[in-house]
Image (spheres, helix red, strand yellow):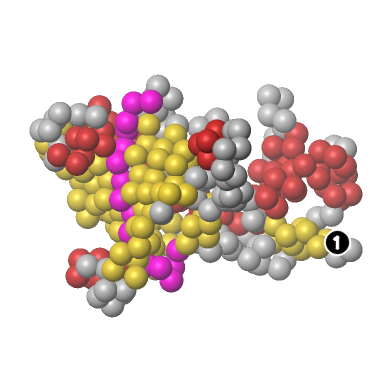
Amino acid sequence: MIPDPYRPRYREIEQALRLRIASLRPGDALPSDADLCREFGVSRMTARHAVHRLAEEGLLSREPGRGTFVAEPPSHRRANNLIGFSDEMRRRGRDPWSRLLRRELRPARPAEARDLRLREGDPVVALLRIRMADRVAIAVEHVTLHGRCAPAVMHADLERGSLHDALRAAGLVPHRGRATISAEVASPDDARLLDVPPRSPLLVERRVIVDARGRPLEATESRYPADRYALDVDFVVEAAPRDGAPGDEARREGAAGARIEGARIEGARIDGADGGRPG
């Protein structure tokens, strides 16, 4: 790999290790910190930082006294970050692709107009995809995009390519989102598209994504078989309020972390909003 003078050295090491991990199996050993120092000509702190970042993503496991190993592919996604499906599956060592069943420009329906802050009947792009990993259907995905996204996506490759990459290339950058997570049973259409029995349990995620100026870009519903996908949630445990204690209301309103109201996850960040690659 040719060094990039504008990229931090730990990012160079991180990217090189990602490429190696893609060709390895869970449990395979990676170079030690000392080996990485010699290979890349960096300090031990820089090498450790690169490895630590990959370990935080769940790609590597560090075992004291034994070394660093390729981790088992994670089966869960952290609900307070939205990483692109393609990148997420590649991190697990799987081959992501989509079956594009529908792509059309049509008038917005009432719920779509509300989510995207449009008038009913304004133009939107509607997509229906089955998100695949290898030969397994992971989700049925219904996407509605603001009409200004049409030039970017109507002719884009949405089977092997990334929707968010197509938007970013047109200057429409996904930045933040809000999602609601619920449990439902598979409809006859879900059962057929996902190859699951009718009324099987599904994890359903409905989200709206906005750009850096807060303008809605996308309203999406993803329907996952419960035995193929899961979401992990960080939360804060609030102390029981004491009657009349000052600051109780502020504590109730200002709890940090992912906030759970029933099954609502609020304030999710889009991985890549600071320069990464959602999609």
- The answer to which of 117 and 96 lies nearer the viewer is 117
Q: Which residues are magenta?
A: 214-229
Left or right: where 162 falls relative to 244: left
117 versus 185 height, above or below: above
- The answer to which of 211 and 195 lies nearer the viewer is 211
- Residue at 81%, 55% (x, y): give it: 31
196 versus 246 height, above or below: below
Q: Amino acid at mark 1?
A: Pro
- The answer to which of 223 and 195 lies nearer the viewer is 223
The percent position of residue 137, horizontal first and vertical second, equals 36, 65
Membership of 108 in magenta stretch: no
Classify mark 1: helix, strand or loop: loop
Residue hosting label 1: 64
- Residue at 64%, 56% (x, y): give it: 58
- The answer to which of 226 and 38 lies nearer the viewer is 226
Left or right: where 106 falls relative to 178: left
